[in-house]
Image (cartoon, helix red, strand yellow):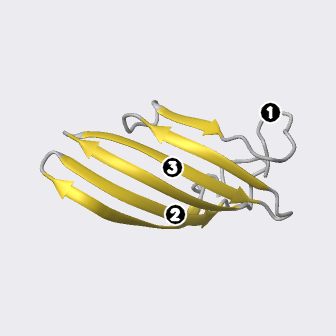
Amino acid sequence: MADAPSVCGQSKDTVLYSAPDLTVSLWEFNGVVPAESAFKGPLQNATSHCMAYHRVLQGKFSGTAACLWTDARATRLLARLSTFPISRASTRFSLAPGSGKASAAGARTL
């Protein structure tokens, strides 16, 4: 399954406000990183829960999400994803500080 998606799950997008030049929505996602995923590493087989705020202002998208991944050993990783504007090339991913041990890559677990 070489072309498997990185994360499988379901999401819900709720429009909070919409006008011709501004739309604000809230997004929630629950899923799992499948074993066959192209995304390998410590999050493989982990569950994920993400919540986000999205805004489209005069046709330009911006958004911020917080995601919590939990692996089979109940280790949790909290991350923040920001997109300004929406595109794969400009998506920034940063790890949020936690209260647990730091991994070799500098990420913190909760």
Q: Residue at x 67, y 59 (%)?
A: 33
Earlier along the polypeptide chain: callout 2 or callout 1?
A: 2
Residue with the mark numbered 3: 65
Residue with the mark numbered 1: 105
In the picture, measured across the screen, residue 11 lies left or right of residue 85, that is: right
Residue with the mark numbered 2: 29
Give the residue furthest to the front.
Answer: 99
Earlier along the polypeptide chain: callout 1 or callout 3?
A: 3
Residue 41, labelled with which disc? Answer: none
Check disc 2 and give the amino acid type: Phe
Check disc 3 and give the amino acid type: Ala
Q: Can residue 36 be seen by looking at this rendering?
A: no
Residue 26: percent from the left, percent from the top? 39, 59
User: Disc 1 to disc 3, how far (Cα)?
Assistant: 21 Å
Which image quarter is the N terminus in?
bottom right
User: Disc 2 to disc 1, how far (Cα)?
Assistant: 26 Å
User: Disc 3 to disc 2, how far (Cα)?
Assistant: 10 Å
Depth order, front residue of 40/110: 110
Residue 60: percent from the left, percent from the top? 27, 37
